[in-house]
């Protein structure tokens, strides 16, 4: 479970910090300053890691209740892309968007869905870091469900089974703590949808977010 994993992940560095601190104290009493300094360095890393986890959790914590209202997925995608603008400007990434002509109405907390989109896009940007022609394709379609697909031409997913587990990451400390997909899949399933991942037939990762679509009767009810 998410909160159990989080408290484990925060308690572990706390315990380790106590150990390093006790060690540093002893080393200082014995005038072994070099070694004491190394211990302080480890403590610094642990503080850094706890800070990264807290920041990540905070960015997903929203004040108050979830806001349930109908919104257009295409608009949520546009907001997510504009939130990513600083990162996008730093890189030469080709972003291809395929959107249907008509709006795709879904019901839910738009802010949270935007956070899911930002996380998928950020992962795609990270994954294409070493590609010669980094490309991210975003496809929105409406059928039985609203489906948003994010496809990149990076190296693909290493371990499909661990992908959604809290704290699973292949990134360097400081680049990722492995909470994005765990939180994102929670957000999507809270809205009655699902977030899935696979590797593309021609390489790269493919993430698919499906959300229940709002039909016209629901739209009328929501408007009342
Ligand atoms: N587009 C992608 N291509 C390849 N691997 C990915 C992609 N997105 C996510 N992953 C893998 O899933 C892991 C977990 O992702 P996430 O939960 O967002 O945490 P983080 O980005 O902090 O590592 C990543 O470290 C990476 O190994
Ligand atoms: Mg991520």
Image: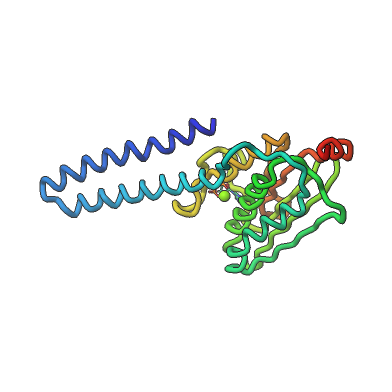
Which residue is at the front of the view, 177 or 157?
177
Q: Is residue 215 left or right of residue 95?
A: right
What is the x, y in percent for residue 134?
65, 64
Q: Report which quarter residue 82 is drawn in.
A: bottom right
Q: Is residue 20 left or right of residue 95?
A: left
Q: Report which quarter residue 159 is drawn in.
A: top right
Outermost residue on the right side: it is 216
When the figure is inspected, residue 131 is found, relative to residue 16, above or below; the finding is: below
Residue at 64% x, 44% y is: 112
Q: Report which quarter residue 143 is drawn in.
A: top right
Residue at 67% x, 34% y is: 190
What is the x, y in percent for residue 196?
69, 41
Which residue is at the front of the view, 16 or 211?
211
Q: Is residue 119 left or right of residue 18?
A: right
What is the x, y in percent for residue 177?
49, 47
When the figure is inspected, residue 68 is found, relative to residue 1, above or below; the finding is: below
What is the x, y in percent for residue 145?
81, 40
Q: How many marks?
A: 0
Which residue is at the front of the view, 73 or 200?
73
Outermost residue on the front side: it is 224
Residue at 53% x, 33% y is: 2
């Amino acid at each position: 479970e998410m909160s159990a994993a989080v408290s484990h992940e925060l308690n572990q560095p706390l315990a380790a910090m106590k150990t390093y601190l006790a060690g540093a104290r002893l080393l200082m009493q014995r005038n072994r300053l070099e070694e004491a300094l190394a211990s302080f360095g480890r403590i610094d890393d642990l503080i850094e890691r706890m800070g990264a986890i807290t920041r990540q959790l905070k960015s997903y914590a929203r004040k108050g209740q979830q806001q349930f209202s109908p919104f257009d997925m295409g608009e949520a995608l546009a907001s997510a892309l504009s939130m990513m603008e600083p990162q996008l400007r730093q890189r030469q990434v080709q972003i291809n968007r395929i959107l249907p002509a008509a709006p795709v109405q879904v019901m839910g907390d738009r802010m949270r869905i935007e956070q899911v989109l930002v996380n998928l896009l950020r992962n795609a940007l990270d994954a294409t870091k070493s590609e010669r022609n980094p490309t991210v394709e975003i496809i929105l379609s409406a059928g039985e469900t609203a489906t948003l697909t994010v496809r990149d031409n990076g190296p693909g997913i290493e371990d499909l089974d661990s992908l959604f587990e809290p704290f699973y990451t292949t990134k360097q400390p400081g680049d990722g703590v492995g909470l994005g997909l765990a939180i994102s899949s929670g957000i999507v399933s809270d809205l009655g949808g699902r977030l899935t991942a696979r590797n593309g037939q021609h390489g790269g990762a493919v993430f698919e977010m499906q959300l229940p679509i709002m039909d016209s009767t629901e739209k009328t009810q929501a408007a009342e």
